[in-house]
Amino acid sequence: MTAVVHAPGAPCWFELATDDQPTIEAFYPVLFGWTLERTPMPDGSLYTIFQLDGRDVAGTYSLVPGPGGAGADGIGAPHWGVYFRTDDCDKAAARAVALGGRMIASPFELMEHVRMAVCADPEGVVFSLAQQRAHPGADVLGVDNAVCWAELATRDIDRAERYYQQLFGWRLRGHPVAPHGYRVFADGQRMLGGLLQMRPEWRDLAPHWSIYLQVPDVEACVQRALELGGRLESAPFEANSDVRIARLADPRGAAFYVIQFFGDPPA
């Protein structure tokens, strides 16, 4: 596998906030064949990096309890989050707010690893900014058992497109086999993810960023996830003739997609 180089504006890291780290650390390694690398943090907690064949795939940390059971950072229940690379975290965070977003955590240094900030877009969807220091982000993307796609589910796709395009300089375009109105964002190298217009049948589900993990067999992955205590959020379906998708939640409720490609994955 070739290490990934993340261009500015690209999803560069994927992080699970959970309220039960031991349970999560038993679930994902069995489901995806990941190994664990634990790092002590200044507050005494452990940050765990999930690895695939020795390469960093994603991370997880424990939510700090706050009022009503939410995390102290205000982000709430267990969830997968997405970091976007920036060359200047302070400038990007200021721009995220100037464009109509909100600052949740102002830029700060996370040890020697990264300078980061946590923001919310105009719909309140949380995302993070990463100015990489010692840690370069995910070492591998787009192979079996690794993240291959990031997707924003939004109730106002036009506003979301304007916001992220101005913030990250994305090139956005339609996709010939995706749902009507779907937007794909890309850098100069490859497609990075998409923006999806939420439909009425989504009911009161809040807009959110999601990750897709590539697997060789969606049905087998779903069955294994259920055996491990996960939950099926959306049964396997064919998005088109080349793709089969299911939405799962881990034992603590953090949702993610698994996707199987019958043709070539997006390049």
Image (cartoon, rainbow, N blue to C red):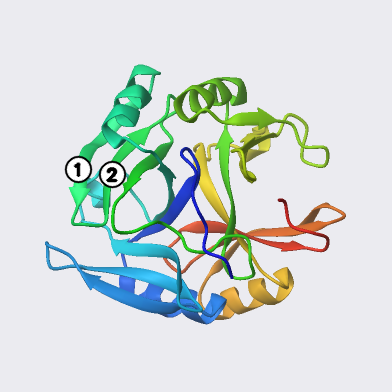
Residue 98 showing in the rendered view: yes
The amino acid beneath tag 2 is: Met
Q: Is residue 96 left or right of residue 9?
A: left
Q: Is residue 148 left or right of residue 11?
A: right
Q: CA distance from mark 1 to mark 2?
A: 6 Å
The amino acid beneath tag 1 is: Phe
Front position in the image: 252 or 48: 48
Measured from the top left, where is residue 246 in percent x and y?
Answer: 68, 60
Seen as rendered, the residue at the extreme right is 241
When the figure is inspected, residue 5 is found, relative to residue 127, above or below; the finding is below
The residue tagged with tag 1: helix, strand or loop? strand
The residue under label 2 is 116
Callout 1 touching callout 2 (CB < 8 Å) = yes
Seen as rendered, the residue at the extreme left is 43
Q: Earlier in the sequence, mark 1 or mark 2?
A: 1
When the figure is inspected, residue 259 is found, relative to residue 129, above or below; the finding is below
The structure residue drawn at horizontal position 18% and vertical position 67%, both measured from the top left corner, is 45
The residue under label 1 is 108
Front position in the image: 40 or 153: 40
When the figure is inspected, residue 21 is found, relative to residue 253, above or below; the finding is below
Q: Is residue 229 left or right of residue 118?
A: right
**Quarter of the figure with residue 60:** bottom left
The structure residue drawn at horizontal position 55% and vertical position 77%, both measured from the top left corner, is 31
Q: Is residue 55 left or right of residue 146?
A: left
Image quarter (top left, top right, bottom left or bottom right) of the N terminus: bottom right
Measured from the top left, where is residue 97 in percent x and y?
Answer: 33, 23
Measured from the top left, where is residue 250 in percent x and y?
Answer: 49, 66
